[in-house]
Amino acid sequence: KQEVTQIPAALSVPEGENLVLNCSFTDSAIYNLQWFRQDPGKGLTSLLLIQSSQREQTSGRLNASLDKSSGRSTLYIAASQPGDSATYLCAVRLVYQAGTALIFGKGTTLSVSS
Amino acid sequence: EAGVAQSPRYKIIEKRQSVAFWCNPISGHATLYWYQQILGQGPKLLIQFQNNGVVDDSQLPKDRFSAERLKGVDSTLKIQPAKLEDSAVYLCASSLNSGSNTEAFFGQGTRLTVV
């Protein structure tokens, strides 16, 4: 059974710091990995999608890497800002008999203080 | 491009009552998902549709939950009767298909409180 773990569960940093969020998964047979952002009381916003054949994806101050063989992904946020405060969720897309599905971790709640 | 629309945004009901949620996916998206997110947890897949057919409902508590996607577009998720532990955010998502390159897009969710 695929399990997705995110460490740390919560993180507080001052504005301007660079930070790394970690995601690990137990089954390396994934199609892709997607990082989402969730603001309180809101839905999920897709940040980055990394295909299983890719090593990393970048969007602005965000960089996500994927090491499928070791079952790890990291989300790097450069020069953090208070507006980055949110919960960050990692999800892997895996194949099973009925099709494909996204399996989520519990998330990392980030707080950036000004 | 319009995103995934869900309604209502919030719902408070008493236990043993019934409730229904509605989702309108992004136009042209064949795959639709319903997820349940309990406070402090990641979303858990309840049911997945490909067009109007069910692909996976293995984690749907079928004694009380039901879902349909008539005509392969909008979908409704129903709970009858509701229990206290059903309090959660119910998220609808859609993707172009269920293939390897597909990206999932989520709605704002419906926050259900059962009292």
Image: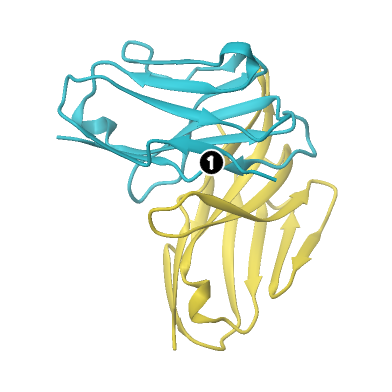
Determine the residue located farthest toward the right in the rendered image: A53
Q: Is residue B87 above or below residue A69?
A: above
Q: Quadrant of the C terminus of chain B?
A: top left
Q: Nearer the viewer, residue B26 or A91?
A: B26
Residue to which mark 1 is pinned: A3
Q: Residue at x 70, y 24 (%)?
A: B30
Q: Is residue A109 left or right of residue A1?
A: left
User: Where is residue A80 drawn, in percent x and y?
Assistant: 57, 81
Q: Colour of chain B?
A: cyan
State which quadrant residue B27 falls in: top right
Please report the residue visible at 37 percent of the width from the left and 36 percent of the height from the top: B8
User: Which chain identifier belongs to the yellow chain?
Assistant: A
Residue B62 coordinates in the image, percent (x, y): 38, 12
Q: Amino acid at mark 1?
A: Glu
Q: What residue do we see at 57% from left, 12% from top? A: B70
Position of residue A73 measured from the top left corner of the image (x, y, whole percent)? 66, 58
In this orientation, which residue lies closer to the viewer: A67 or B73? B73
- In the picture, measured across the screen, residue B37 lies left or right of residue A74, that is left
